[in-house]
Structure formats: C-alpha cells, structure tokens
Amino acid sequence: MTARDAESNLRERRKRRTQNAIIDAALQLFEEKGYDAVSVEEIAAAADVSPRTFYRYFPAKEDVLVVDPEVETAMRAALAERRPHETDVDLVARSMITALAARRPERARGAYHLLDATPALQARMHQLVWRDQEHVVEVLLTGAPRTPEAELRARVITHAVTGTIRVAVVAWIQSGQRSTVVAHCEQALTFLREEFAY
C-alpha cells in the first residue's frame, strides 16, 4: 500500500466515523424528543460537529435516517456481482436483501419506526427509492439491446421486487418485529416468486 493509499483510507475512515456519529446522535435525539422537535443544530452539537459539517454529509435532516452509505455500497456491490444462472428477479432481490442486511439492526429498528410515523421521511425515502430503482433498471438493461419491451420488463421486475420488500418491511414493523426484517422480506419474496413461477 502506498502512502497515498494509506492517506486515502484514513480519510475514508474518518469520514465514516463522522457520518456514524451524526446518525447515532440523531437517532438518540429523535427517540428522546420526537423527530419534529429536533433541529439540525441539536444533532450537530450532540455529534460534536458544526451544522456546516452536518450539511456536508447530509443535505437535509431527513437524510440522516434514509441515507446510509454502507447500505448503498452494499447494494451496488451486489448488483455488480451477477451470479451464474441467476435470474433478473433473483439479482434484484438479492441486492435489496443485501442492502437491508447491511444496516445495523439498532439503527434499522429506530429508523423504520420513525419512517412509519413521519410523512416528511416517507416523501424523502420515496425520492431515494426512485433513484435506486433507476440504477437497478440500468443494470438490468446492461449488455442487451435497449428496446421498449426490454425497458418495460426491467422496470416491472424492479418495481415488483421493491414493492414486495416495502410491504414486507411494513408488515415486519406491524408484527412487533418478532423475526428479522430480512427473514420477513425473504418470505414475501417467496410469495412473489411462486405467483410468477420463478
């Protein structure tokens, strides 16, 4: 490893530590006071950073709960790893399950409950899910002729799997989280595959 690589790794670790400190501080404050009662300034102070630093990592307060770099990295890595004989449905499902599993359980529980109860968070999550869906569609279209039929197929698969996982997460929250969110999603995806004969 070169000195430049070592310096780059150190910067990345510091960046990740700061992100984690902000997320953890925000979740604790949201749990104590409620989402709407907490300001960016309070989160920054609790994380021992300035509001300016907060906005360097998260464009808005909502993003603390719905943007997780570890989750995005895990999903994109899974999408890039096409396995032999893997169907498009299985590729999309595996990548989304991998992303869910990448989120720390204690963060996931707090974030999902807040998402379920906060319209502003739901709106932001919808924007990010739409962005991620577009990336998945592009992955499915890679290496094949880009026809209207192929694009429609890629969108149907992506939205079907995303919708199934969203329903499963909500059901998991409402069930009292007796199993893991990943197990709940795997069960829901089994129903999807059965109905569409995958």
Image: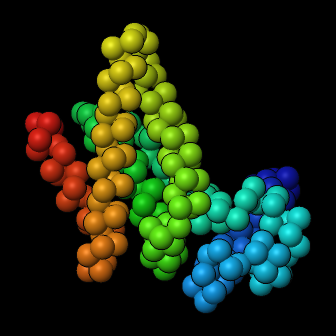
Tell me what residue is drawn at x 30 percent, y 56 percent: 167
- Left/right placement of residue 65 relative to residue 163 reads right
Colour style of the rendered protein structure: rainbow
Q: Quadrant of the C terminus?
A: top left
Task: Name the foreground residue: 10 vs 191.
Answer: 191
Q: Is residue 177 left or right of residue 17?
A: left
Q: Give the percent coordinates (x, y) of residue 35.
A: 62, 76
Residue beneath the point at 82% across and 75% down: 41
Residue under the point 42% across and 60% down? 100
Give how far across and how far down residue 50 sits, in percent: 88, 73
Task: Please say whether residue 61 is visible from this viewpoint.
Answer: yes
Question: Where is 3 relative to 129, above or below?
Answer: below
Rendered location of residue 77, percent (x, y): 50, 46
The residue sitting at the bottom extreme is 32
**82 with respect to 85 (left or right):** right
Residue occupying the point 46% across, 22% down: 142
User: In this orientation, which residue lies closer to the viewer: 2 or 159?
Assistant: 159
The vertical placement of 12 against 148, above or below, is below
The image quarter containing residue 172 is bottom left
Instruction: Say which of 27 and 143 sits in front.
Output: 27
Q: Is residue 20 above or below residue 161?
A: below
Which image quarter holds the N terminus?
Answer: bottom right
